[in-house]
Image (spheres, rainbow, N blue to C red):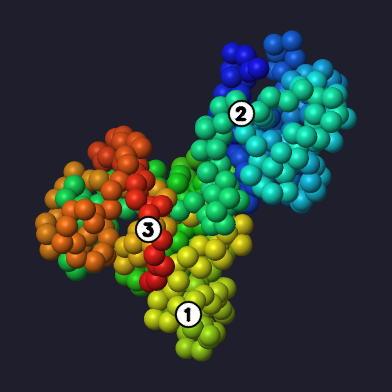
Amino acid sequence: MATAADHEHMARALVLARRAMYNTDPNPRVRCVLVKDGRVVGEGFTARAGGPHAERVALAAAGAAARGATAYVSLEPCNHTGRTGPCVPALIEAGIARVVCAIRDPNPRVNGGGIRALEAAGIEVECGVLAAAAEELNRGFFTRMTRGRPWVRSKIAASLDGRTALANGRSQWITSAAARADVHRWRARSSVVLTGSGTVVADDPLLTARLDEPEADVLQPVRAIVDSELRTPRTARLFTAPGEIVIFTTRDGGGNADALVAAGARIERVGGVARCDLGEVLARLAALEANEVWVEAGPALNGALLRAGLIDELVIYLAPLVLGDRARGMFALETLTSLDAAVRLEIDDVRRIGPDWRVIARPASQAARPQRGRV
C-alpha cells in the first residue's frame, strides 16, 4: 500500500518531469527519483529521443547507492528495446528493492509487461500513485496509444465579444505580448502546430516556438498545413525557419506541388475531394508519432474540427476589447435554430495572462459527435 512518503516522492518526480516538457517527443515525459533511507540518491528525466530514459539517468547518478533503493517513476518502466535498451533489466541489475510507478504505460509493447517483469525478479511494485496527474502530463502520448490520434488543442485569440479578426481580416495583435509568450510555451510542448492554408496566405506566420528562456531545450514542432488545393505560397515565411513542414492535400500532385517540395515541404495526400478528411490528417500525424497537436487556424478549420468532434481542448485568450458584430468569429458552423444544438463546453481553467484572460475548456459533447470533418 502506498504511503504518504510515496505520494511525496512521486509528486517530486512529476514536478521534475516537466523539465522534459519541450524535447522528449515522441517519447513520454518521465522522471525517476531514487530514494534510500529517506534520502534522494539519484534522479533523472528522459532525454531527447535516442538518449537514455529517466531510470537509466537516475541509476547512473546514484551509482552503488541505488542498491536497496526505491525507484519512483512517473510511468511504468519499459521492458522492450526501442531506440534505447529497456529500463527494467537496468533496475533489476542495479539492485532496486521497490518500484513505485504512477501509471501503467499505455504502449501495447509495455502495458503491464514492465511491472510483471519487475515482480518476477522479486521487486515489490506499487502502481497508481498520482495516476491522474501522470496521465495529464503525457495526455497526448496516452491519446495516441489508446485512440490512434494525437491530443488536439485549438488556440484562439479573441476579443471579449468573441471576435478573432476585423472584417478585413486584420488580427495582429488582439491579445497582449504576455498572452503571445504563453502561446509559445504551448507550441514548444506540442509535437505539431497545425494550421490551414488560409491562415498562411492571410497572416504568413512562422509557427515556430520561440521562448524567452535561454536554458530551455526546445525540439521544434512539426508545422503542418491543411491545404486541399495546394495554395500555400512557396515564398511563405515558414519556409525560412528550420524544421519539418508537412502539407496535407487531396491532390495527387501538379500545380504548386513541385515548388512546395523544392521549398522544403513534404506533401501528404489524404482522403476527400474538395476538402481534406481531418480524421485522416490526425491519423497520419499519429503515424508520424505526434502526441500533441496545437491548432492555430481560422474559423473554417476550427469549425470543421469542432463539428467532427476532433478538438479535445480549447485554449482561448480573451482580450479586454470589443470588435463588433461585423468582425470575424471563432468557428464557421452551420446556422443553429435551437440552443439544444449548441456545442457545450466544460471549463477546466480560467486565469489572467497579462491584461488578458485564458480559458481552457473541453467540448462536453465531443464523444457524441462522430461526424467526418473536412476542410
Q: Between 58 and 113, which is closer to the camera in this rendering?
A: 113
Left or right: 79 as drawn, with respect to 356? right
Expressed as whole percent of the image width and height from the top left, the position of residue 201 reads 35, 72
* Among the two numbered marks 3 and 2 on one chain, the one whose residue lies closer to the N terminus: 2
Q: CA distance from mark 1 to mark 3?
A: 24 Å
The disc labelled 1 sits on which kind of residue? Thr
Which image quarter holds the C terminus? bottom left
Left or right: 197 as drawn, with respect to 122? left
Label 2 sits on residue: 128
Q: CA distance from mark 3 to mark 2?
A: 31 Å
Where 50 sits versus 373, above or below? above
Residue projecting furthest to the top = 37
Q: Which mark is residue 97?
A: none
* Among the two numbered marks 1 and 3 on one chain, the one whose residue lies closer to the N terminus: 1
The disc labelled 3 sits on which kind of residue? Arg
Q: Are marks 3 and 2 in contact (CB under 8 Å)?
A: no
| In this view, the mark in front (1 or 2) | 2
Circle 2 residues within 10 Å: few <14, some 14–19, many ≥20: some
Label 1 sits on residue: 250
At horizontal 19% and vertical 68% (from top left) the residue drawn is 168
Where 6 sits versus 148, above or below? above
Residue projecting furthest to the right = 93
Q: Is residue 102 visible?
A: yes
Q: Which mark is residue 369?
A: 3
Where 341 sits versus 53, above or below? below
* Among the two numbered marks 1 and 2 on one chain, the one whose residue lies closer to the N terminus: 2
The disc labelled 2 sits on which kind of residue? Gly
Q: Is residue 65 visible?
A: no
